[in-house]
Image (cartoon, coloured by chain):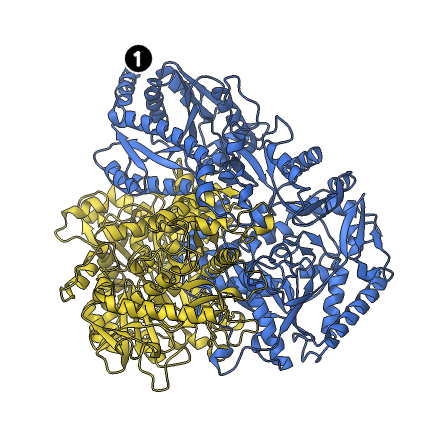
Chain colours: A blue, B yellow
Amino acid sequence: MRRVGTVLWPKLRVLQVYGANTGVGKTIFSSILCRAFQRRFPKVHYLKPVSTGPQDEADDHHLSSLTKNVQARCLYQFSEPVSPHIAARESPTPLTDANLVAAVSDELKSYANGSDGIAIVETAGGVLSPAPSGNSQADLYRPLRLPVVLIGDHQLGGIGTTISAWESLHIRGYDVKSVALFSEGRYDNHSYLKDYFAERDVHAISIPPPPERNPNILEDIKAMQEYYDSAANMEQVTTFTEDFVTGHDQRISALRTMPGEAHDVIWHPFMQHSERSKDNIVTMESAYGDFFQTYTTGQDPIRTPKLANGENAMLKPAFDGSASWWTQGLGHGNPKLALTAAHAAGRYGHVMFGGAVHEPALRLAQTIVSDMGNKRLAKVFYSDNGSTGMEVAVKMALRASAARNGWSYEDEVLILGLKGSYHGDTMGTMDCSEPSIYNKKVQWYTGRGHWIDFPQVKMQKGRWIVDVPDEFEGKLGERRSFDSLDAVFDFEGRAEDWKVYTNYCADMLSELERQGKKLGALVMEPILLGAGGMFFADPLFQRALVHTVRNRGTPPKNDTDWSGMPVVFDEVFTGLYRLGRFSAASFLQVDPDIVVNAKLLTGGLLPLCTTTASQSIFEAFLSNDKSDALLHGHSYTAHAMGCMVANHSLDIMKKLDSADDWAQFKHDWDASKTGQVTSVANGARGTWSMWSPDFVKDISHRANVDYVFALGSVLAISLKDPAGSGYASTAATGLRDKLLAGVNNQDEWVIHSRVLGNVLYLMAALSTNGETLGGVEDRVLKAI
Amino acid sequence: MRRVGTVLWPKLRVLQVYGANTGVGKTIFSSILCRAFQRRFPKVHYLKPVSTGPQDEADDHHLSSLTKNVQARCLYQFSEPVSPHIAARESPTPLTDANLVAAVSDELKSYANGSDGIAIVETAGGVLSPAPSGNSQADLYRPLRLPVVLIGDHQLGGIGTTISAWESLHIRGYDVKSVALFSEGRYDNHSYLKDYFAERDVHAISIPPPPERNPNILEDIKAMQEYYDSAANMEQVTTFTEDFVTGHDQRISALRTMPGEAHDVIWHPFMQHSERSKDNIVTMESAYGDFFQTYTTGQDPIRTPKLANGENAMLKPAFDGSASWWTQGLGHGNPKLALTAAHAAGRYGHVMFGGAVHEPALRLAQTIVSDMGNKRLAKVFYSDNGSTGMEVAVKMALRASAARNGWSYEDEVLILGLKGSYHGDTMGTMDCSEPSIYNKKVQWYTGRGHWIDFPQVKMQKGRWIVDVPDEFEGKLGERRSFDSLDAVFDFEGRAEDWKVYTNYCADMLSELERQGKKLGALVMEPILLGAGGMFFADPLFQRALVHTVRNRGTPPKNDTDWSGMPVVFDEVFTGLYRLGRFSAASFLQVDPDIVVNAKLLTGGLLPLCTTTASQSIFEAFLSNDKSDALLHGHSYTAHAMGCMVANHSLDIMKKLDSADDWAQFKHDWDASKTGQVTSVANGARGTWSMWSPDFVKDISHRANVDYVFALGSVLAISLKDPAGSGYASTAATGLRDKLLAGVNNQDEWVIHSRVLGNVLYLMAALSTNGETLGGVEDRVLKAI
């Protein structure tokens, strides 16, 4: 499958013609515009990618017969005069969207290979009329994101159909800066529409309709020629063409100045700005599916083969290899999520949530509580992002343990956590992490915890191993090797390790107790410790830690009550199918008392967070005193857009899980196992990844690779750094830069990725298909 | 002007018929549905609010002649057979949207006053065809939010127009659960559309088209009667009517169970849940413009006059009197913002912002930096809400002062602030506030500041006064009285106060210095201290404090450099026109070094925050060491939806400011002055409010009112509480409950408001008009 991106060349101006309906005059307007453009450019191309009906009636035929010197072409001609999706049924090989769009892209590229020119691409039918694949026109061509002129509907009812068509294009991310339609006296649509669109920064023009058809063909042609000549010379049309050319040039120059302007005014997150220049800021012109459309001053012209005329495309598709900082799940520019977001905005806007409820927030809370498969969970608290949600979680947990243990608000209460944890950037969550490069220069940082080292899961030279820290030397073997990832999760088969782990944890807790430390919560990222450096914790150890913690102190009153200390799972990164399952806790077969979800929650569209707690935690805040309440709440708490998009996203993800979408991935990982472990649907085993087992193994054998691992949509490659690992290491940046520059000269796309010190990680959307992943894997293997 | 709300009665089921285009058979489908419903309900009403063309051809006429026992009615009949917006030009008095919708609402109410029934409301033309006012059909009827059946387009091109029409309804917040169209063999639109909509949970039905028109009128009528009879008996149609009735009942029952379900699963912000029951949870069924559509179990049936049949409406419009926790600026369900949100989602989704830029984020940053009118500001850092943005601001400021003063990371560095400040709910911002009810039971809270008391501006008994704290006793008069609010802002005229204030501040700073306190930043909410209790700080005092702070320590290197300590303004609540100006700092004529904006930033739609800093602050983080960088960043940093909606919102707000929208408010306040102070456009003076001066004065004279103030869109009423003021006071809750229950039995709408202890505040959107505000004022005067 081809992956083409947004079409943009400095010297080929491409205009796409969409119709508000069929029969509104797309081809007539195309002809007029071709003529008008001819006065300025020697080369004017007209492209009708798909045409239905007899060839001599076809639009491209009509156009070339009526308009001199226009290069008119149709790529796919179906003889039956019906909608392309019906006509295409006659075709022996189905015409996929990807192939059709690639053919259009190639055709346009061949035009770009000439002198200064114009190309007009005419769509079939209306904006959402079906393409040969059955997908809509607007969705089919979206990857190219060509500037659009919408031909409005001059007929009765045409005001409404024109605006609706414009809205359908607009919500799909198109730039529709102009509308053109026939001026028709009776309905006067054009007067209304000009005002309507002017208010929306869209310029509308109208011209008289063509003469009535004349049965005498020669006279008919003559009348049409005259009509075209006169229309092409109208001031409105001339202005339109001038504006379009200016708009194209402005788009190019805006792209070129954008990195410099960003350098002037933007303070980027997580960046040492002394290393930033306008040449290394990546401009995201737009994004679609798995890909950004990127521009960088430092690569202008971009590293793709130059055309014969010296032209280079301005934009390069780059695979979103960090899933946009771990948020992205269902593809960029997803029209379903865009529509749902707008529906929520249209129904509610944002409605305040203090003592109030609305349907999307209620439904989302119910889904989280029920689908987590954790009988402890009862109440959902909303906030805006993982960091705020973790602040809420910590407030909840500490209050609950302080109340039970009779600690006062002056007591120094700590959390228990793992080294290398990371829970967010606000002070309360920073304090949950051990001192590190992230927080050591933050004036108010106060590490408030005890953090322990933990055994890690890694693949090295084709084998899964559990690498243990010093504390376990002599207790466990130095490293434990497994035939498959499932075997790591075979808790029953690792009874001996369990004993060592639980004993270790019990001793540690006793020692801390002896020191008089007040531990108020166990706070952990289950399975994967993300921003701290991408560590894959041995799930058996995490399970043992929870188990040991819960075996201490007052026994639980019932099976949803906490004991020892409240267990908080930060699933902001690991939850909601990032690792292939709704809940990351399920890998450990552990039910935390509090769980935090964010990132993927909205499918990767906008910020939202849930902190879900047990009834027992909730009750710690109940009293007749208002000051005992959880006095926390953000203005946009449970904003309707976020909740509704989350509901829709979770529905889609659930379908991905239950339908066949991931079956091949699951099968590949199942087949890669040695056979002694049977996969279990809902237990800890049955692990799989979207990254192929062969690829992961291959990487693990590379000389510069320390280790690698993959689970669900996540892949992490730890590179050897003689200077030492950690956030300050630059071992992985070379690989990152190589992937972004492109490993093959002929590649249509490259990979945008992020590193954490010496670790380069890659993350797919949940909807990324195997073919795209294969392309990513090829490039990584070449670059590494 | 009438303000009607969403129409929902348990026993009157209302279905609105929209067409994907004109001529798709809306009236024919209405007739068929009327017949089908007649088999189940004795009373079937057909309402055509607006009809154009000769009366005997009108849809209601057609319908009553063809369908027995259907009560058919048209409210407004225009004889010219053109679009209503053209036809309405013949009308002597313009037919406004509000009047038309009120007439429809009244008509439906009269139907509800009968036995169990059905009403079908047929729109004119297509979904976005113009109404008499020129607004679209879908926008006109949106306040009623009736359930919709969309009549699809069976003609060539009809697939696209039908889907686009559905999208236009969907983004306006309508529930469109069904589509109906004629089955037309050649284009087969119905097959395609059934699959398409099924995937979107919309049920589509198709029936054969009617017979060709017969020139013989009697035979024509007979043929149509037969057609209707047969169509109304088709299984698809029967199923449709059954589903519709079931859907209506489910909507009612879902509304009734929602508060209870919310009680089970939601953990509300800022609420002592022992006080919560399902009967006091407000369900927001939807919202539009300034109004929520609310349902509460505790008020079912709601407190409006019962109909003769004992029926009550289920929903009550409630004025959003807290501007949805201070966020709302441009009305709920604003279709322009909804479209813009969807456009951003369609063009980008969310694209990661680490080292990257996109056009909406760049443009927003440039607007913030330029429009703030503060020459110090240079760099914009994005985060998700006011609390996270304030965390960023504090990190910035403390690093800058630590660097300049040579403080180590172990030093205890404090902020200087005002008592009663509130900057957010995350730990770092909580630590910026003095100990209070909000934080005293939060285990990790550590007040890290020195907080000073300050003089407050209040209106009491018709006079503006400055009420001073004990510290000023004997220095300033106990209270200072002013003729107008502008006089309070007349800094030149208050030279004596200035001297007292600056001396006081200088003494205080010297004393703190003497005590060895390290003050790293001045952190303040300019003018209004919000969540801490709604205090109106004397602007002269805030100005004096900044002035004094800046006069100490190393003199600034240039006029954008900070001196003394960095000045952080928390304009999360007060900025972006909440008080009538882009920047609240401009009231003080002070340029802070760091400004934080959120809430209104997106017009009230979704969370987004900017922390804007001076170049000098930015440079404190520059070095060759990555760990010196501001290592802060949220996954959704600068999400495209937020930025694009913010750009659009700020554009609209700027227009509100420059156009005549606020002219009347400004005029009223200007006229209320005694004359000795001339208003100045951009200086500190020229203060005004959306709340009328007469109303504010009236309130200030009430016996149970301690004081009141109004500025921009904000009104705060401090009620006398013998038990003492503050967050724990319940003095204002009685007024709040009265406003929500409704002060007049005949009122179409009530007021939803929030209190902060003994203060009840009201906040309008920036787009709320004087008429609505007048209605709010009337109710408040009655209730107080």
Residue lying at the far bottom in this picture: please name it: B722
Label 1's element? helix
- Residue B79 rendering spot, x and y as whole percentages: 17, 46
The subunit carrying tag 1 is A
Q: How many residues crowd around disc 1 within 10 Å: few (fewer than 14), some, or many (20 or more)?
A: few
B680 or A752, which lies in front? B680
Q: Nearer the viewer, residue A725 or A235?
A: A725
What's the residue at 70%, 60% (across, down)? A419
Residue A479 image offset from top left, x and y in percent:
83, 54
In this picture, is B657 found above or below A301?
A: below
**Numbered-mark total:** 1
Whether residue B696 appears in this view of the structure is yes
Counting from the top left corner in percent of width and height, residue A432 is at 62, 64
Q: Quadrant of the N terminus of chain A?
A: top right
Q: Which quadrant, please, contains the C terminus of chain A? A: top right
- Name the amino acid, label 1: Leu
Q: Report whether B442 appears left or right of A119.
A: right
Q: Residue B10, can we see it?
A: no
Q: Is residue B183 above or below residue A582?
A: above
Q: Quadrant of residue A692?
A: top right
In this view, A650 is above or below A126: below
Q: Is residue B71 left or right of residue B280?
A: left
Residue at the (38%, 40%) spot, across then down: A165
Q: Position of residue A474 (x, y in %)?
A: 87, 60
What residue is disc 1 on? A218
